[in-house]
Image: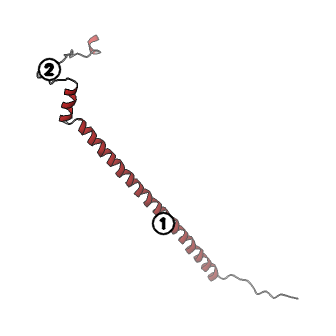
Amino acid sequence: MTYIQPKKSYSLINILLAAAVLGVLGGAAGLIMIYNQTVALSHGIQISKNELRAIETANAEMKGKIFSLFDPESVTAFASGRGLIIDKNPQYIEVSKQWVVASYR
């Protein structure tokens, strides 16, 4: 029994069509990967923004605590609680105006 096989020749159109299909599939896969990276980046940016807001809130609360410590009323209460008084004419220690290192010449 003899099998008759037709001549298999791949014409230029078939080769170009196969290349175009592979190009379209490769392009689609590339665009899907780019889209996934863009979405991941967007989520990362959103997470960073939320962390930044939390840090800014903590910073504002800390500034509020620091400013409340140096409030004139709380400083006065702190001083009076420890028996300190306001000195109208303070006497400061005077230090020589020459530098210690420069005085050895």
Looking at the image, residue 36 sits to the left or right of residue 59; the answer is right
Residue 13 in view here = yes
Residue 7, percent from left and from top: 75, 85
Q: Considering depth in this image, is 65 or 38 the residue closer to the camera?
A: 65
Question: Image quadrant of residue 74?
Answer: top left
Residue 42, percent from left and from top: 43, 60
Q: Residue at x 64, y 79 (%)?
A: 15
**First-in-chain label (2 vs 1):** 1
Secondary structure category for the residue under label 2: loop
Amino acid marked by disc 2: Pro
Secondary structure category for the residue under label 1: helix
Residue 94, percent from left and from top: 19, 16
Q: Residue at x 24, y 39 (%)?
A: 68
Q: Residue furthest top?
A: 104
Relative to 88, residue 24 above or below: below
Mark whose residue sits in front, 2 or 1: 2
Looking at the rendered structure, which numbered label has been put on residue 90? 2
Q: Label 1 neighbourhood size at 10 Å, few (<14), some (14-19), many (20+)?
A: few
Q: Residue at x 71, y 83 (%)?
A: 9
Q: Considering depth in this image, is 78 or 27 the residue closer to the camera?
A: 78
Disc 2/disc 1 C-alpha distance (Å): 71 Å
Q: How is the image coloured?
A: secondary structure
Amino acid marked by disc 1: Tyr
Relative to 54, residue 34 above or below: below
Circle 1 residue: 35
Residue 105 in view here = no
Residue 53, percent from left and from top: 34, 52
Q: Considering depth in this image, is 9 or 50 the residue closer to the camera?
A: 50
Looking at the image, residue 74 sits to the left or right of residue 54; the answer is left
Question: Image quadrant of residue 86?
Answer: top left
Relative to 76, residue 45 above or below: below
Looking at the rendered structure, which numbered label has been put on residue 71? none
